[in-house]
């Protein structure tokens, strides 16, 4: 049967209505649930448990299954969302109820953002909670309530705002009282109750006189001892007739024949002729000395005396024992006066040229013991610092240190890399030391918190010396036996800076 266009339009509209109606319960169901905390005022401490109920649109508790899927607790709700704290769900069998456990690390208002499924429907809401400080912490038990006098009230969020009378901030939080005994100490000092000390994890140790023993580490390169090398050459022109030591790496002894050379120099031949003429006149010593100046050995001069004929070939001998590091001489080669033919080095002792950072150099001194460990392995070697080079590498800002090490077995090879450790000792019992963790270093100043009675903490500027084995030398600012804070000092520093800022203000000028 033919149907009109109006008929089909009516049918499509009816189908769309049925489809939308079928989805409606899922779309509007979440809007008809809400969250309500059974208590919105909770103690400012860790591991606080509290309950949240799910209500229907009539404000009545539901009896359905509730599963929390996302939790977030912010210090807020007025602009401190970056300060979050721990919050977890605790298992419970009560329908319509969520049990939570949270750490309220400070007093004030907190925003709880909660997402949960209620019978399969996802519901999200926010609850504002208030963490309240216990009265026992507001007033130290060591003093009676009537004996403590309030100097002024400060902003609960640490803002530079004080008041001479009680007041609330813009979030409804009470201003915190500052007692006269808390600000009676040196500028920037912080007075804390035992409860706050325990909760902040503050620990102290005694400064003591102990030696600073540290190991400075650097990277070194094995090098030839420059005082134990020699270049073998002659002072005249000639040719290499024969090489008696023919390979780089050969070990030679002092005065060992190295090569035979043929004398080409007309000047040397003339000096020999002068010597032979002087022999006839009986005054040859001056002519012999002249030959020696040009490297003609006594054995050649003796040969001249014996034969009366010029010598054209002579033996070149090693001037010292050692290893042939370079060999330029080959048979038939012509050489000029002063040209290097062999380079010899005595490797029984070698240098280690080590690099250390600029900050480490003041702790290094000539004579200190050094341990050298080849990167390739093997047993460590012990040597001593013999020289500290007077300049720095302008790119790496490192300085070079020369260490002398025995190498009788020849195991150390020139050019090898090694790890170098120099043991640095302090001044024995004359050195006051504290743990590294006691020092707060801002880059421009270094401070240590010191306490005399365990409740008042005073910041002291210190001058630091050497560091080593987890300790630092104190040159001034802390004396032997002073109790210094080694844990929780960052919190003390923040409070100290706040107290110092508030001390510069006049509470009387603030309005209630």
Image (cartoon, rainbow, N blue to C red):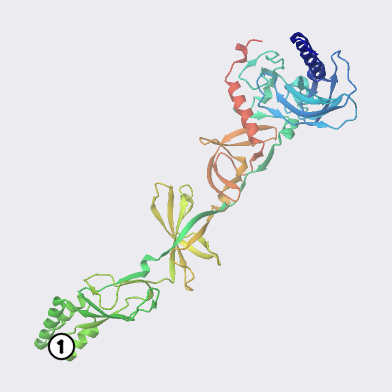
Judging depth in this view, the residue of 24 and 30 nearest the camera is: 24
Q: Residue at x 29, y 74 (%)?
A: 329
> Within the image, what quadrant is residue 334 found in?
bottom left
Q: Vertical placement of 262 versus 96: above or below? A: below
Judging depth in this view, the residue of 8 and 281 nearest the camera is: 8
The answer to whether residue 302 is left or right of residue 36 is: left
Q: Residue at x 86, y 14 (%)?
A: 59
The answer to whether residue 16 is left or right of residue 397 is: right
Q: Which residue is mark 1?
A: 309
Q: Vertical placement of 309 versus 503: above or below? A: below
Q: Residues within 10 Å of mark 1 (few under 14, many from 20)?
A: few
- Locate the C terminus and report the quarter of the image it occupies: top right
Judging depth in this view, the residue of 79 and 434 nearest the camera is: 79
Q: Position of residue 133 (x, y in %)?
A: 76, 23
Q: Residue furthest bottom?
A: 306
Q: Position of residue 130 (x, y in %)?
A: 76, 20
- Locate the N terminus and report the quarter of the image it occupies: top right
Is residue 510 among what the camera can see? yes
Q: Residue at x 70, y 35 (%)?
A: 454
Judging depth in this view, the residue of 61 and 355 nearest the camera is: 61
How many discs appear? 1
Q: Residue at x 78, y 18 (%)?
A: 27
Give the SS element for disc 1: loop
Q: Residue furthest front?
A: 1
Q: Position of residue 134 (x, y in %)?
A: 78, 24
Q: Position of residue 509 (x, y in %)?
A: 60, 11
The answer to whether residue 402 is left or right of residue 123 is: left
> Within the image, what quadrant is residue 112 found in?
top right
Is residue 33 among what the camera can see? no
């Amino acid at each position: 049967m033919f149907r009109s266009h109006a008929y089909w339009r009516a049918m499509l509209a009816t189908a769309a209505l049925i489809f939308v109606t079928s989805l409606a319960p899922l779309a509007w169901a979440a809007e008809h649930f809400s969250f309500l905390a059974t208590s919105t005022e909770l103690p400012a401490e860790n591991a606080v448990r509290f309950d949240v109920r799910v209500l229907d649109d009539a404000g009545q508790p539901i009896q359905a299954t509730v599963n929390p899927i996302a939790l977030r607790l912010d210090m807020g709700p007025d602009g401190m969302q970056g300060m979050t704290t721990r919050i977890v769900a605790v298992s419970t069998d009560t329908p319509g109820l969520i049990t939570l456990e949270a750490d309220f690390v400070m007093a004030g208002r907190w925003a709880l953002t909660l997402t949960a499924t209620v019978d399969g429907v996802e519901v999200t809401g926010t609850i504002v909670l208030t963490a309240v400080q216990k009265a026992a912490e507001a007033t130290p038990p060591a003093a009676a309530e009537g004996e403590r006098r309030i100097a002024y009230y400060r902003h609960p969020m640490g803002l530079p705002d004080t008041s001479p009378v009680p007041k609330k901030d813009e979030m409804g939080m009470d201003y915190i009282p500052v007692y006269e005994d808390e600000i009676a100490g040196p500028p920037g000092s912080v007075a804390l109750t035992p409860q706050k000390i325990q909760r902040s994890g503050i620990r102290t140790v005694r400064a003591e006189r102990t030696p600073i023993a540290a190991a400075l580490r650097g990277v070194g390169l094995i090098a030839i001892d420059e005082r134990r090398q020699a270049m073998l050459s002659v002072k005249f022109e000639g040719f290499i007739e024969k090489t008696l030591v023919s390979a780089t790496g050969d070990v030679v002894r002092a005065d060992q024949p190295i090569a035979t050379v043929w004398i080409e120099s007309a000047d040397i031949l003339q000096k020999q002729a002068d010597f032979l003429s002087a022999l006839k006149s009986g005054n040859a010593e001056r002519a012999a000395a002249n030959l020696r100046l040009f490297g003609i050995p006594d054995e050649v001069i003796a040969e001249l005396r014996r034969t009366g004929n010029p010598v054209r070939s002579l033996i070149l001998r090693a001037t010292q024992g050692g290893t042939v590091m370079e060999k330029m001489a080959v048979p038939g080669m012509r050489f000029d006066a002063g040209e290097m033919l062999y380079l010899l080095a005595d490797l029984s002792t070698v240098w280690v040229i080590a690099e250390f950072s600029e900050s480490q150099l003041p702790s290094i001194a000539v004579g200190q013991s050094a341990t050298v460990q080849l990167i390739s392995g093997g047993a460590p070697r012990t040597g001593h610092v013999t020289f500290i080079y007077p300049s720095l590498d302008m790119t790496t800002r490192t300085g070079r240190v020369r260490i002398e090490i025995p190498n009788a077995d020849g195991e150390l090879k020139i050019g090898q890399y090694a790890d170098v450790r120099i043991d640095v000792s302090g001044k024995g019992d004359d050195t006051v030391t504290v743990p590294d963790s006691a020092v707060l270093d801002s880059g421009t100043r270094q401070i240590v918190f010191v306490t005399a009675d365990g409740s008042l903490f005073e910041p002291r500027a210190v001058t630091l010396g050497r560091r080593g084995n987890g300790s630092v030398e104190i040159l001034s600012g802390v004396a032997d036996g002073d109790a210094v804070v080694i844990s929780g000092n960052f919190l003390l520093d923040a409070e100290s800076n706040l107290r110092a800022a508030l001390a510069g203000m006049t509470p009387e000028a603030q309005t209630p």
